[in-house]
Amino acid sequence: MNFELTEDQKKIKESFARICDKEIAPRAEYIDKEAVFPKESIELLGKSGFLGMGFPEEYGGNPGDPITKALLGEELAKACASTYLSAGASAGLFAVPVWKFGTEVQKKKYLPSVLSGNNIGALAITEPHAGSDVMGIKTSARKKDKGWIINGSKTFITNGPVADYYVVVAYTDKEKKRDGISLFLVDNGTKGFSRGKPLEKLGVRGSPTSELFFDDCEIPEENLLGELNNGFYQLARTLTHGRIGMAVYSLGIAQACLEESMNYAQERTAFGRKLAYFQDIHFKIADMKMYIDVARELIYKAAWMLEQDDPQSILFASIAKLFTSEHATRIASDAVQIFGGYGFMKGYKVERLYRDAKLGEIGEGTSEIQRAIITKFVEDLY
Ligand SMILES: Cc1cc2nc3c(=O)[nH]c(=O)nc-3n(C[C@H](O)[C@H](O)[C@H](O)COP(=O)(O)OP(=O)(O)OC[C@H]3O[C@@H](n4cnc5c(N)ncnc54)[C@H](O)[C@@H]3O)c2cc1C
C-alpha cells in the first residue's frame, strides 16, 4: 500500500489551488453576504476540467482518479463552500445518475453542457414532509399516452432557483414502496413546472436553495432516467458519491479553519505573548490536525472503494461523511474560539466557516442516518 501522492497529483493540486486562491476565494465573502450564485466560478470550474474529472471524454469529461478529485475538491471547499456545494450538486448529484443510468441520448444531451459549467443541474429528492425518509415522498409520476405527468413538490433543493435541468424522484407505483420509485429528467421551462424563491439560510448563502413545484407537469416518455421502479437503488448509488462529496466539503472547511487558526495564533498577542505560546491553543490546533488527517484518509479510502465498485463503499462513504462532518463542526467552533470576539464578527472568515460547517451534518443524509447505515452493516456482520 502506497500512501504517497504521485508527482502528477501534487502538480494538479498545486495548479488548481492557485486557481482557487486567485479566482474563487476572493469572491467567497461577497457571495455569502449578498447571497449571489457564483455562475462565473462554475463556468471557470468547467473550463479548468474540475467538473468533468472522471467522466468519459465523449460526454465532455476528462481522465481523473477519485483521489485527485478529492484533493481538488478539498481546495475548492476550502476556498468557498458555497461554490463547492453548487458545483457538486450540478456535476455530481445531477450528472452522476445521468452518466450511470442514462441513455446515450440523455448523456449526450445533458452531460457536455453541465460538465462545461454552461448549464446547471440539480437533484430533487427532499419534500416538505420527507427528507431522511425517502419512501415518505408524495411526488408521483403517472403514465399518460407517450409521456409522464408529474405532481408534487420538493424543498431545500440546491441550485433549485438557477438550474436548467433536474433529476426528480417520484413514485411510479406507490404500492410497491421502494420498488415503486423512479427518476425523471425535467428541464426548466417545462409546462407545469415552477420553482420558488431562494430560501434564506444560515450558511452556504451563495449556493441557492429552493422549493420546486410540479402541477400536472408533462414530460416525454424518454425522460425516465434509468429503469422504471428502480429509482431507489439508483439513488443509493448516487448518494454514495454524494456522501463522499459532502465529506470533502467538510474536510475543506476544516482545513481552512486550521490554517486561519494557525495564522491568527501567530499574530495575536495576549499577556505579552503570542497566542501560539499557550498550551490550550496548542491542544486545539493539535486536535484539528489529527482529525483532519484521519478524515482525509477515510475519504480517500471511501473514494477508492467506490471506484472499485466495492459494495462496502456505502459503509465507508457513511463513515467518512459522519466522521469528517462532525469533526469539522467542532473544528470550526474551536477556530471561532481561538479568534475570540473577532471570530464572532462578520467579515472574519472563521465566522462564515462556522456557519457553513453545520450543513455537513445535515445534507446528503443527516448524522443520525449515517449512524443507522453503519449499524446496519455491523448487524449484517454478526
Ligand atoms: C442547504 C441545504 C441543501 C440541500 N440540498 C438538497 C438537494 O440538493 N436535494 C435534496 O433532495 N435535498 C437537499 N437538502 C435536504 C437534505 O438532504 C435534508 O434536509 C436532510 O436529508 C434531512 O431531511 P429533513 O430536513 O426532512 O429532516 P428530517 O428527515 O425530518 O429529520 C429531522 C431530524 O430527525 C432525525 N431523524 C430522521 N429519521 C431518523 C431515524 N430513522 N433515526 C434517527 N434520527 C432520525 C434526523 O437525523 C434529523 O435530526 C438540502 C438541505 C439543506 C439544508
Image (cartoon, rainbow, N blue to C red):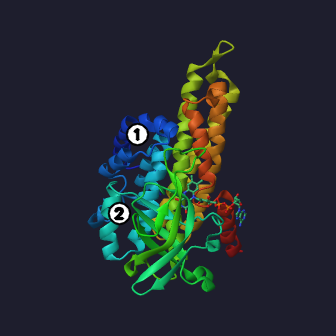
Question: Ligand 1 appears in which quadrant?
Answer: bottom right
- The vertical placement of 171 against 366, above or below, is below
Residue at the image point whose x is 41% and y is 45% from the top: 38
**How many C-alpha atoms fall within 10 Å of the one at disc 1: few (<14), some, or many (≥20)?**
many
Please give the residue where the numbered disc 2 appears in the rendered image: 55
| Three-letter amino acid code of the residue under disc 2 | Phe
Q: Determine the secondary structure under disc 2.
A: loop
x, y (%) of residue 299? 53, 55
Tell me what residue is drawn at x 56 percent, y 67 percent.
Answer: 153
Task: Count residues near mark 2 (Cα–Cα under 10 Å), then give few for <14, some for 14-19, many for 20+.
Answer: many
Q: Amino acid at mark 1?
A: Ile
Residue at 60%, 50% (x, y): give it: 359
- Residue picked out by circle 1: 24
Residue 81: give x, y in percent of width and height.
Answer: 50, 45
Mark 1 against mark 2, which lies toward the viewer?
Answer: 1
Toward which corner of the image does residue 170 lie, by quadrant?
Answer: bottom right
- Whether the residue under disc 2 has CB within 8 Å of ligand 1: no
Quadrant for the C terminus in the image: bottom right
Q: Is residue 352 visible?
A: yes
Is 365 left, or right, of 7 in this rendering?
A: right
Q: Is residue 61 visible?
A: no
Residue at 49% across, 41% down: 78
x and y, in percent, of residue 122 in the image: 46, 61
